[in-house]
Amino acid sequence: IRLTYAGELPGEVLDRYQVISQGASMPIAEVIRTGHSMRVGDTAELDPRYEAVVGDAVPAARAAMLEPLRASDGRVIGALSLSWPSPHAFEQAEIELAEQVAQVMGQAVERIEINEREHRIATELQERLLDLKARSTTAVVSATYEPAGELLRVGGDWYTAIAVDEHDRIGVSVGDV
């Protein structure tokens, strides 16, 4: 699990908990594993198995509300963790708001994952189609490639040339990604 933080936490805590195992003894890992929300009014009252992470998080997190982030098909794709610097009794309105925020965030994260996957597929396709090492033995093919932009790397022209048959004919295909 890759964790991203917003707010004030000591640098050594951020470094220690950038990436954690899904089986880690941490409330956020449990929420992701089980798909169940967790509300912690006072971290001092948490199960002793969380003692190490609670010690690292105090004083920044003495209370927390954790909600699973779900994709449209219901699978858990992450978790939202909100924390308070002192013990806190959660009101129903706060709980409902956190649940709504988690629902919207789950949809946003899912869209981001889909866009990243589509971008990765398009980039891989483009790189394969632009493989200039594949040369015909019967023709010399040359082209100039100018990508749309270094950041996107998708959107440029592509070409390929292949032998069509044994009669010295080649097929040339050109397109725009």
Image (tube, rainbow, N blue to C red):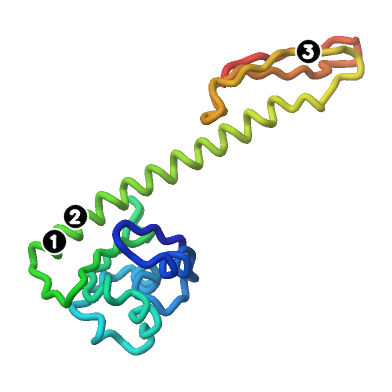
Reading the chain from its start, which is encountered first: label 2 or label 3? 2
Q: Which residue is mark 1?
A: 96
Asked if labels 2 and 1 touch by Cβ distance under 8 angstroms, the answer is yes
142 or 8, which lies in front?
8
SS state under label 1: helix
Mark 1 to mark 2: distance in Å? 6 Å
Residue 131 vertical position relative to residue 64 in the rendered view, above or below:
above
- Rendering coords of residue 62 (x, y %): 23, 76
22 up-or-down from 69: above or below: below
> Which residue lies under the disc numbered 3?
142
Left or right: 124 with respect to 93?
A: right
Which residue is disc 2 drawn over?
100
165 versus 24 height, above or below: above
- Mark 3 closeness class: few <14, some 14–19, many ≥20 residues within 10 Å: few
**Quadrant that contains the C terminus:** top right
| Contact, mark 3 vs mark 1 (Cβ under 8 Å) | no
